[in-house]
Image: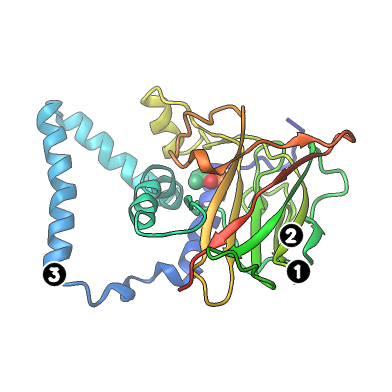
Amino acid sequence: MTAVQDSPTARGAGANASANFKAASTASAADLADTPPERVAAIVTAVLKGVHEAIKEYDVNYAEFNAAKAWLMEVGEGGEWPLFMDVFVEHAVEEQVASSQKGTKGSILGPYYQPDQVKLGATCKLPRRDDEVGTPLVLEGQVRDIDGTPLAGSEVDIWHADSDGYYSGFAPHVPDGNLRGVVVTDEEGRFAIDTIQPAPYMIPHDGPTGQLIEASGWHPWRPAHLHIQVRAEGHRTVTTQLYFAGGEYLDSDVAEATKPELVLDPQDDGTGVRRSTYDFELERG
Ligand code: MBD
Ligand code: FE
């Protein structure tokens, strides 16, 4: 790892992820004002039943109850609810919603999306530091309707970690907008993005989520991944992630967000650049 002045902290990343989520339109509880009380009660009862059953099954005592209470408070105070929810819960929601959808497989959004990034032409270089470290990687492909029609002018919004596993906006030493951009497809719906190979991502271990992972004896890693959200007018937005064949943690993602359809196998083009093709298919809606 490169030496950094301001070391990234779980608390810092958590504060930014929390602020980000609150600013997003998806975060409003008012949107659910029409949910019938029966549905609220049924879901909350099911969740609590799971908690009550675990207490019985494992003969949970007061020391453990109080530790859990203190831990929950720390998750809130450290701003780690976005991280915890996206690592341990979001994949189940994504799979549930996706079961009725066609087109390119989705995956979880995660806590590190930032809207309104720089717009780039179809063939582009993702913004990066002059001295950005990492193996060159080019991702090219086409955005189409599921009927095969190319979708010109669609947006391939891409963001990923650097070769140390850090995301811009969530690590103080990485400049804003680094390795983020909104790529606009050409008249044939095509794009070619020049970037670098990201590293696997480690859940920060200096916060409560990392402490829980350690106390459980699990590993804190996500395999290396590109986050991509594809938007096209008149089509359902696809939020997904692309992974790398042979990469570490591909079969043991702590966030359980990998799918076999989402694994790239980039090949060296003979100049030290790894290239991969991936096409996106969106359904109308
Ligand atoms: C990530 O980079 C991520 O993609 C998810 C889902 C959770 C934590 C960090
Ligand atoms: Fe990520």
**Residue at (45, 34) in percent of width and height:** 254
The C terminus, quarter of image: bottom left
Find residue 173 and report its horizontal and vertical position in percent.
Answer: 72, 47
Disc 1 is placed on an element classified as: loop
Quarter occupied by residue 98: bottom left
Q: Which residue is mark 1?
A: 186
**Residue at (63, 54) in percent of width and height:** 279
Q: Cβ–Cβ below 8 Å for labels 1 and 2?
A: yes
Query: Neighbour class for label 2 at 10 Å: few (<14), some, many (≥20)?
Result: many
The disc at residue 37 is 3
Closest to the observer, 131 or 233: 233
Disc 3 vs disc 1: which is toward the camera?
A: 1
The N terminus, quarter of image: top right
The residues tagged by marks 3 and 2 sit, at their Cα atoms, a distance apart of: 47 Å
Find residue 62 and report its horizontal and vertical position in percent.
Answer: 16, 32
Query: Neighbour class for label 1 at 10 Å: few (<14), some, many (≥20)?
Result: many
Of the image marks 1 and 2, the number of the one nearer the N terminus = 1
The residues tagged by marks 1 and 2 sit, at their Cα atoms, a distance apart of: 7 Å
**Residue at (15, 47) in percent of width and height:** 48
Find residue 269 and report its horizontal and vertical position in percent.
Answer: 84, 37
**Residue at (38, 32) in percent of width and height:** 212
